[in-house]
Image (cartoon, rainbow, N blue to C red):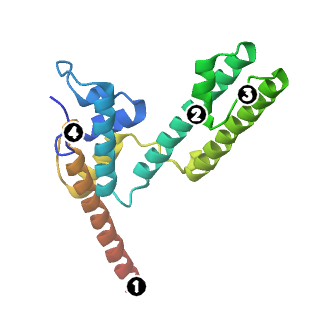
């Protein structure tokens, strides 16, 4: 079985994939699906989930973390390529580095070669600045909630008065219950405010 829709994908599995990046949780072992296909599927499901929870910051934070992860991998690859080229001129590494950082490394003179490597390293370090800018958009440690998904589901069940299996609750049902919970909390706050004003 492949979880190819939010109607069937349990919210706990979705959260676990977000936290661990283990895409194999989207399909059972007997399914023959490549990691690339699972990544495309998970990206699609993540976009759908983000639309369901438009006001929820967790999906926005997930997308920022995903971009940070991509930039960190790009930075590590570039820095490894530069280190390799410091010891040995390798055409395939130079080509990969020039595509990755959009730099040209000249090999006709030694002093040009090392200056180009320094320029490539400076350009790679600019990726760090982009990573820091993205990290600044994330909530600070004290702002993040430490509630587990089970705690959140228990609170939803208590507030809405609905009983459900935490392990089987689909992403779409979760989104609907979140909206109901917010509406119920808002209604209770309004009634408390009315009582205070009397």
Along the line of sight, the residue nearer the viewer: 133 or 19: 133
Query: Viewer-nearest of labels 2 and 1?
Result: 2
Q: Is residue 125 left or right of residue 42?
A: right
Q: Is residue 121 left or right of residue 9?
A: right
The residue depicted at 22 percent of the width and 56 percent of the height is: 176
Q: Earlier in the sequence, mark 1 or mark 4?
A: 4
**Residue pushed farthest top?**
88
**Residue pushed farthest left?**
1
Q: Which mark is residue 197?
A: 1
Query: Viewer-nearest of labels 3 and 1?
Result: 3
Query: Viewer-nearest of labels 1 and 4?
Result: 4
**Circle 1 residues within 10 Å: few <14, some 14–19, many ≥20:** few
Q: Earlier in the sequence, mark 3 or mark 2?
A: 2
- Assess whether mark 4 and mark 3 are in contact (beta carbons under 8 angstroms): no
Instruction: Tell me which corner region of the image, top left, top right, bottom left or bottom right, holds residue 112.
Output: top right
Q: Earlier in the sequence, mark 3 or mark 4?
A: 4
Residue 107 point in image, percent of width and height: 74, 23
Q: Is residue 70 above or below residue 177?
A: above
Q: CA distance from mark 2 to mark 4?
A: 36 Å
**Circle 3 residues within 10 Å: few <14, some 14–19, many ≥20:** some
Residue 77 visible here: no
Instruction: Tell me which corner region of the image, top left, top right, bottom left or bottom right, holds residue 180.
Output: bottom left
The residue depicted at 29 percent of the width and 31 percent of the height is: 38
* Residue at mark 4: 9
The residue depicted at 57 percent of the width and 33 percent of the height is: 99
Q: Which mark is residue 61?
A: none
Query: Viewer-nearest of labels 3 and 4?
Result: 3
* Residue at mark 3: 106
Q: CA distance from mark 1 to mark 4?
A: 45 Å
Q: Quadrant of the N terminus?
A: top left
Q: Earlier in the sequence, mark 3 or mark 1?
A: 3
**Circle 2 residues within 10 Å: few <14, some 14–19, many ≥20:** some
């Amino acid at each position: 079985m492949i979880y190819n829709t939010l109607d069937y994908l349990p919210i706990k599995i979705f959260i676990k994939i977000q936290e661990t990046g283990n895409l194999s949780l989207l399909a059972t072992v007997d399914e023959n699906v490549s990691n690339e296909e699972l990544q495309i599927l998970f990206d699609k499901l993540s976009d759908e989930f983000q639309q369901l929870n438009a006001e929820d910051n967790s999906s926005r934070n997930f997308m920022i973390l995903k971009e940070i992860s991509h930039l960190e991998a790009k930075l590590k690859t570039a820095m490894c390529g530069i280190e390799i080229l410091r010891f040995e001129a390798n055409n395939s590494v130079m080509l990969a580095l020039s595509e990755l950082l959009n730099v040209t490394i000249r090999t006709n003179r030694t002093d040009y070669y090392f200056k180009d490597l320094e320029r490539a390293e400076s350009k790679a370090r600019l990726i760090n600045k982009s990573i820091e800018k993205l990290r600044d958009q994330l909530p600070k440690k004290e702002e993040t909630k430490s509630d587990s998904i089970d705690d959140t589901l228990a609170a939803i069940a208590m507030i809405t008065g609905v009983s459900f299996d935490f392990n089987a609750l689909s992403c779409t049902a979760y989104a609907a219950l979140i909206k109901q919970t917010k509406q119920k909390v808002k209604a209770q706050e309004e009634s408390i405010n009315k009582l205070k004003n009397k």
